[in-house]
Amino acid sequence: MASSRRRFLTTVGAAAGGAATFGGRVAGWAGSKSGQITSDSFSPAELLKQHITKPEATSAAIVVQEDPRMPTQEEVESWYTDRRNWGRWGADDQRGAINLITPEKTVAATRLVRTGRKVSTSRVFEPEQHFIRKSSRATGGGSVVDYYGFIYHGQTITHIDALCHMWDTDGMWQGRDPDVELTTQGASFGTIDAWSDGIITRGVLLDVPRHRGVSYVTPDSPVHGWELEEIARAQGVEMEPGDALLVYSGKDAFVRDGGVYAGGDRPGLSVTCAKFIRDHDVSLLGWDMMDARPNPYGLTFPVHGVLFNYGVALLDNALLEPLAGVCAEENRYEFMFMGLPLKVAGGTGSPANPIAMF
């Protein structure tokens, strides 16, 4: 079992981490061999300074400005270089934007609970491998135990991404070298157990389909950051630092209507949502539709980039349709949010059953 796991991780690492694209440029991660800043000589402030002072790079991606509100290539790239949160809470910080959830923020979230109504934002967990073993007792009766085998990252299981899960050519969260921090035995930096005390804060749901008067977001009309601003105003909510932002796009209605939501082109959130997330100091992003594809800026991780650039936890593959219905019934879009990842040593994430309580 251990040897097969080791081979699997080595293969995935080569495929996922061997090259990364930013702004149309392709480069392999080579740590100190290519002059990259490694964990031994790391300075988040110095890396940010390099990005701010370096000459503008020529990008291979060409952005067609059909909407005057769309940012330029340079503006988008600056969101993920000049505005990184690396070093904001110290060079060795592993909690990221979850630091914004202070004890006072959590206490304030509890005051949003008025009726005790609870809504799960998790999909039904159906492991790819599920083995059952029954045992009988000599005195009568018996018991049963389970074995689960699954990969939780992706579009199947509701899960929370740890800060070590992704990176670009500048590295993981805090600029760390994935070749150093990730081994076949797990991760050594930015792991999911950094949030083992739980993510308990004010949650805000922004209902995109309701605002648009449609059933779901379509591939030709991704969600934009300025639209999230409009929805928040229309719903009467104001984003606050440390909030958990849940963006409902109608994935389940899209699939029921025959839409295909997979690894290729798909509806979802535009990179412009990253600016909204950074402007409002969001601590966690939960979504049912993820990065819209294709994206016109050539970014490998258009919105997933908030994970390793801003330190924002990601609640992937959330089931938000029931929560959207309850928010409409309750006529309020703020609640206490509870995301409790498992304490997985060296884990890059964790399955979760986040709860919204009204």
Image: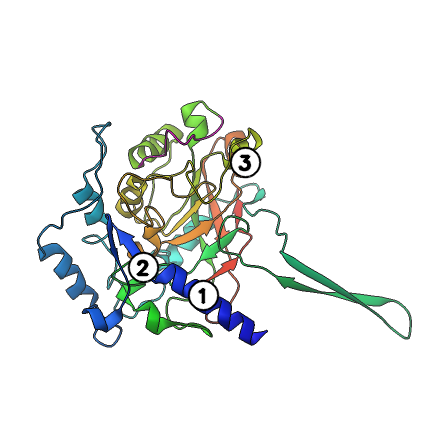
* Magenta segment boundaries in residue numbering: 215-224
Amino acid at circle 2: Ala
Name the residue: 27% across, 68% down. 30
Q: Main secondary structure of the magenta part?
A: loop
Residue 245 lies, in percent from the top left, at: 40, 44
Measure the C-alpha gap from mark 2 to mark 1. 13 Å
Name the residue: 50% across, 47% down. 317
Vertical position of residue 169 compared to residue 303: above or below? below
Amino acid at circle 3: Asp
Looking at the rendering, which quadrant does residue 179 occupy? bottom left
Image quadrant occupied by the N terminus: bottom right
Residue 268 lies, in percent from the top left, at: 40, 38
Mark 2, residue position: 19
Vertical position of residue 163 compared to residue 335: above or below? below
Measure the C-alpha gap from mark 2 to mark 3. 33 Å
Q: Earlier in the sequence, mark 1 or mark 3?
A: 1
